[in-house]
Image (spheres, helix red, strand yellow):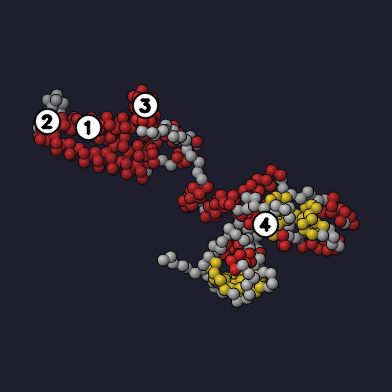
Amino acid sequence: MGDDVPLAALFGLLIALLLLSAFFSGSETALVSLNRYQLRHKARQGHRGARLADLLLQRPDRLIGLILLGNNLVNFSAASLVAIIAFEMGGEPAVALGTLILTLVVLIFSEAAPKTLAALHPERLAFPAAMIYYPLLKITYPIVWLTNVASNGVLFLLGVRSGDTELQPLTREELRTVVHEAGGRISSRYQQMLISILDLEKVTVDDVMVPHNEIIGIDLDDEIDEIEEIISKSEHTRLPVYEDDVDNVVGILHLRRLANLAPQSFDKTSIRTLLDEPYFVPEGTPLSKQLVQFQRRRERVALVVDEYGDIQGIVTLEDILEEIVGEFTTDPADQIEDVVREGPDSFLVSGTANIRELNRAQGWELPTDGPKTLNGLILELLETIPKPSTCLAINGYPLEIVASDENRVRTVRIGPRIATTES
């Protein structure tokens, strides 16, 4: 053999086989390391390499069969060639040494190095490789098909069934991780908005509604002068209208409609003619569902009722949108209505303050899976109305009751969170 083919040509062929082995090994790692969602995105944008890679990965058994066929063919050919070269150069003793050297070379230059490079930069190798593998698979399909039939038959005998290779949808928690991992690609504000959208299913109308005792509306039993004053001072464009008690709502008044009334015709009868039917929703409705319902019904205000039909509060489209984008108001006074800074790390907080709003505004982590207000949280923990100067801790935050009356906690002093160490 050595007399027919020069050693230089044999070494050249060996190097070519080793390069092919490195290509097969690296491209396999690159293709399986691709981010399937980024791959789909680039494929839809028309990237040829991404489109072919996506098609190949839809049948990974065929792709792996092709790569293994090529890699094994190249490696076995290289081993045979090394045996010939070693025998020509040193006889039978050199064959064993040549096998050892080939093993090290293949391990380093045809396996470890290309696979590491492919894992670090998968797209740089996967897309060009896909343009080679796709037509190559067409050419070698009969051999690859027979190989897959044999391998799948062995797996079938072992009780392994081929599963669905379709890309699985991400769960909500996985999407949250993706948003967090986006880093500088998405601004922190947009990240928070996306996470808030994902959390809408975990938040209910009970968490954002204006509670029953804080609803501002128009009582048709009041004098017309009192009604005019409520309308003139209202910060809302829609007000519930009721008779005697807020539980007896007769409609929703859009204040803009009052502009069409002549001043002399403004009375309770004219107000009734301008009312929209009240829209009721059950308590516990997730915000994601309620947002869709607002859109479908073209409503902006809903009254939240319990299982007995009693009104628990009122929720608006603005309340839900604020859960996503944050508070719309830019007035600092509105943001600290229930919280007064007393010291560098001490705050006086109203007992009626909503816990979710406190957590969002102050960066606190008070529990939100129970009562909605700070007063309710304290009463649930103590199971009694605490007297002033009573101290307690909730989730690591020291609380001191500053003022209370017979039926509720009025004011609470909250200090900085105390770090706890687990033993």
Mark 2 / mark 3, whichever is N-terminal: 2
* Residue that numbered label 4 is attached to: 209
Residue 295, how many percent across, how many down? 68, 45
Q: Quadrant of residue 34 in the image?
A: top left
* Residue that numbered label 3 is attached to: 149
Label 3 and label 4: CA atoms lie apart by 61 Å
Amino acid type assigned to the residue bearing label 1 in the image: Ala
Instruction: Label 4: state its secondary structure.
Output: loop
Are the residues tagged 2 and 3 within 8 Å (C-beta)? no
Mark 2 / mark 1, whichever is N-terminal: 1
Label 4 and label 1: CA atoms lie apart by 74 Å
Q: Quadrant of the N terminus?
A: top left
Q: Nearer the viewer, residue 93 or 19?
A: 93
Mark 1 / mark 3, whichever is N-terminal: 1
Label 1 and label 3: CA atoms lie apart by 27 Å
Amino acid type assigned to the residue bearing label 3 in the image: Val
* Residue that numbered label 1 is attached to: 78
